[in-house]
Structure formats: C-alpha cells, structure tokens
Amino acid sequence: MRILIVSNLYPPHYLGGAELLCKQIVDILARQHEIRVLTSDFRLANSKDGDSSVPVSRSLKLYRAFGEDSQKPLLRRWPSKIADRRNSRTTKVVLKDFEPELVFVWSQRRLGIGPALCAQRAGYPVAFIFNDDSASFFIPKRYPPGSLRSFLGFLLDHSLFRSNTTQALDLGASSCISQSLKTDMLAEGLPLSGSRVIHQGIPLSDFPCKAEPGSLGKPVRVLYVGQVLASKGVHTLLEAAELVAADRGPASIEVRIVGGGPEDYVEQLRACNKSGYRLDLAGRIAHDALPAVYRDHDIFVFPSIVKEGFGLTFLEAMASGLPVIGTITGGQGECLVDGVNALVFQAGDSAQLASCILRLVDDADFRIGIAKAARAMVERDYSLEVYAGKLEAFLEESRLGIKALQDPRAG
C-alpha cells in the first residue's frame, strides 16, 4: 500500500514524543508498504535533516511558530486560512507525484487542515489519528449564548472560516490514542463516535530493564522526562522533593529533569530548590541516550496537571524497571493502576507526591513488586510492535472502507 503520512513535525526536528513515535511507526510500515512523509519546514537550530528510511518532503508551513502565544482574537483563524491555501497547493503537487492509496494524517497542530482537506477533495482516502487535543482549535464554535463577540465568532466559523474548521472534513476513519481523549473530543463537538481507540507503544528493545527492577540507591534518584512546562506539573515534583528533603534531609534525594522549556519557567524551577538537595536541570538530551538515563535512576514521576492524551515516558520508565508515580488526569489513567503497577496522586498535590516517594523508599517489597508488574504489562500490551500491528490493521480497514463508500464496486 502507498501511504502518505502528513505530520506537523518529523524527526530529527521534533519537540515531543509524538513526533518520535511517528518516525518509529513510519520505519515499521516501510518494511511492507511504500511510505512518503509530508511535513513542515520547521527545523531546530543546529540540527541537520539527517538520513531517512523513506522520502521526506519538508515543504508545508506552520501557521504559527511553536513558542508563540496562542491567543484567540476574533480573526484567530486567519493565519491558518492563509497557511491552508499555501499548504493545499503544496499537497496537490505531492499527491500528483506519489498517488497514495491512503493519506494518514498524524498531527495537524499549528499546521492546519489544508493538506487533509486537499486530499479528500481530490478523492484520496484519508485516515486520521488524534494524539492530543490540538484538534480542538479547528472545531467550529457552536451557537453561542452571550456576547456579541462569541456570536460573531460563530458566524465567522460557519461562513468565512468554514473550510478551515473540522466541519469541512470527513472524520469517518479515525483513531484516538485513549478513551479519555476520545471522550473529551466528543464533548468538544468532534464527530468521533466511531473512532477506534488504539493505545500507543514503545520499542522494548530500546529500553532494556535494569538488572534489578525496583532497586534503590542512596540518595534516591528521581527522574522526570518530557517537556518542561507548567502544564506538565514539573514544579509539583520539585515541591515534593522539598518536602522529602525536609523529612529525610537534603542528602536523601536527587532530582533530574530531562527536557526543554521556556527559560522563565526553568528559572522558576531553580528557585523551588530552597533546601539544597541535588537538582539537575539537564535540558534536552539525545533520544538514544535516554535508556541509560532511565536505568540510572530509581523512581520516575509523571506529574502532568493537564489531561494528557496518553503518554510515552512513563511506559519507557516502566520498561526500564523503574517504579512510576503519576497523575491520572488523562489517558495514562487507562494504564496506571494505583498499587498494582504504579502509585497515583492528585494533580498538583506535592504533599501526596512526597508521600508516594517516601512509601517507595520505605517499602522495598512493594516497590519491587510494582516495578516488575509494570514491566510485564508493557511487554504484554504496550510494545511498539503491538501498537504498529493494530495501527496497520486500522489503516488497511480505513482504506478499504473509504473506497467502498466512494465506489460500492471497489474492494
């Protein structure tokens, strides 16, 4: 099958795990299918394009750069309307050259719906995956009670900007990475009642388990990996570390934060460390260095405050033999089971998080038990191969289903 993958970002130029996962899936699909990637011209400073197992066209345009404030003026869709027109022209060229049997839209965050809409209007089967809530930006405003401004926004979304919202798309072939995300998107008004839930997975061979799952050092080494943002709750972890340091002494705990974020928030995190425990704000590191980082630590914390679509870092930590403490604000709640394969705490509750850390420190049998249970669960249900197999079946069924709708004689 010839598949065109459309994504806002694509490695080596990426910001989070979703883009890395996209490349991993592309590499697997390319074993059996002819794949081409169409993505934006976003590039990280001092980073080269590098080699790719498939052709990659970096010719699309983001309508707003990452890092820019996403405000909501009355004409907030205007930048995406301009980008959609330009991206539609680019997509037409790629479609004509490649003639895919299926277009698979991985992410439209800050990219717009132009490529997907162009493909559908040209008669190509299009399937979508929803990895996060970014599609909420493209959902048209409903009939608004209240202010004149909201009423004008409703009129614009259903007239001038209609083709820049999801009402212009056929979302009949779609997948969500969690039931939580699907439920939220349905509540927002996205027509995803038939969307298939497929949880993500990780490449187990890249994350070998430490020799002794659940083992603990002195001081206890606590790890966070991900984007360093207030919404990710990183400050909650450092506030909890302060409480642990107050209870057991500053020398009892070390915290390492791996990932990048706004400098003002990073400075805020530095200021959280008042007791003098060891804090390493490591910044971004190469993805292939992460497995060793996981195995070099004792406890992993997933402190997100916002509702996550699902998440990958806690799976990587589980595979590596670390006990995990996390919030269950979103899709990760479909995986993390308190007292069975993880400990859970209320988002933003640093005191509860500190108690969880101390429980793991003090109860070796419990700590080792949940670490082993977590590794077994990831092996069984959350490997990359399992995920890719489910996704491949979804894509093939989507292609056949859409073709049958387009032409009942097709098959």
Image: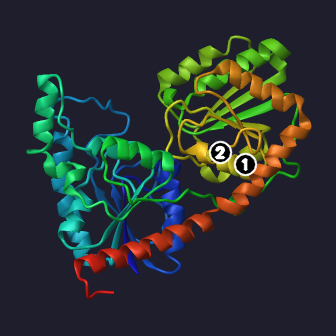
Looking at the image, residue 217 sits to the left or right of residue 78; the answer is: right
- Identify the residue at horizontal 87%, vertical 37% (top origin): 216
Whole-percent x, y for residue 77 in the image: 19, 40
Are the two marked residues, 2 and 1, in contact with CB atoms closer than 8 angstroms? yes
Question: Eyeballing the image, is 288 above or below 231?
Answer: below
Identify the amino acid type marked 1. Met
Task: Tell me the SS state at disc 1.
Answer: helix
- Identify the residue at horizontal 56%, vertical 33% (top origin): 304
- Identify the residue at horizontal 64%, vertical 54% (top origin): 288
The quadrant the C terminus occupies is bottom left
Looking at the image, residue 52 sits to the left or right of residue 289; the answer is: left
Circle on res. 318? 1
The quadrant the N terminus occupies is bottom left
Circle on res. 314? 2
Q: Is residue 99 visible?
A: no
Question: Eyeballing the image, is 382 above or below 119?
Answer: above
Q: In this view of the protein, which residue sits in the foreground, 47 or 291?
A: 291
Gap in angstroms between the C-alphas marked 2 and 1: 6 Å
Identify the amino acid type marked 2. Phe
Circle on res. 140? none
Task: Tell me the SS state at disc 2.
Answer: helix
Whole-percent x, y for residue 44 in the image: 43, 46
Q: Is residue 127 visible?
A: yes
Q: In this view of the protein, which residue sits in the foreground, 90 or 307?
A: 307
User: Residue 96's quadrant in the figure?
Assistant: bottom left
Looking at the image, residue 236 sits to the left or right of residue 3; the answer is: right
